[in-house]
Image: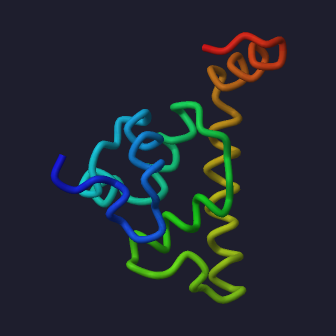
Amino acid sequence: MSDPVSTIRNLGPRSDEVYAKAGIHTASDLRALGADEAYRRLLASGSRPHFIAYYAMVMGLQGRPWNDFDSVEKAQLRARFDAIVAERRSDPDTALRNDLDAVGVRL
């Protein structure tokens, strides 16, 4: 692995493991997918939605610090994040996973 995910600004060493679980093994893979598709894959792999993690990745892919945005850009990022999360929650497989998780069964 020549360019771990953690080489992207704002993404630490733990990111390598989390993203690999989603099938994203390198920074090049992440850049090729883009932020929104990568986040969809993270959610599909079992990561819980977290807005700060989402926008830190978006900013990192742009080479910017995780908190380098104004209120308008933050609102736009929040709308994108909410849409991705809503899309995932409407997936029938996600509903089953949530039901099983509620009774203590992990897939």
As rendered, which of 87 and 63 lies closer to the eye? Answer: 63
Q: Quadrant of the C terminus?
A: top right
As rendered, which of 40 and 83 lies closer to the eye? Answer: 40
As rendered, which of 23 and 81 lies closer to the eye? Answer: 23
Where in the figure is residue 78, as x and y percent of width and height? 69, 66
What residue appears at the point 49 percent right and 74 percent down from the top-left corner? 59
Where in the figure is residue 42, as x and y percent of width and height? 51, 41
Where in the figure is residue 40, as x and y percent of width and height? 52, 44
Find the residue positioned furthest to the bottom.
Answer: 70
The image's colour scheme reads rainbow
Q: Is residue 59 above or below residue 105?
A: below
Where in the figure is residue 15, as x and y percent of width and height? 45, 50
Q: Is residue 33 above or below residue 24?
A: below
In the rendered picture of this protein, how many numbered marks are placed on residues? Answer: 0
- Figure quadrant of residue 20: top left
Position of 14 compared to 105: left or right? Answer: left
- Figure quadrant of residue 71: bottom right
What residue appears at the point 30 percent right and 43 percent down from the top-left corner? 25
Position of 88 compared to 11: left or right? Answer: right
- Figure quadrant of residue 68: bottom right
What residue appears at the point 43 percent right and 36 percent down from the top-left corner? 22
Find the residue positioned furthest to the left.
Answer: 2
Position of 72 compared to 20: left or right? Answer: right
As rendered, which of 8 and 54 lies closer to the eye? Answer: 8
What residue appears at the point 67 percent right and 47 percent down from the top-left corner? 49
Position of 10 compared to 7: left or right? Answer: right
Find the residue positioned furthest to the right.
Answer: 103
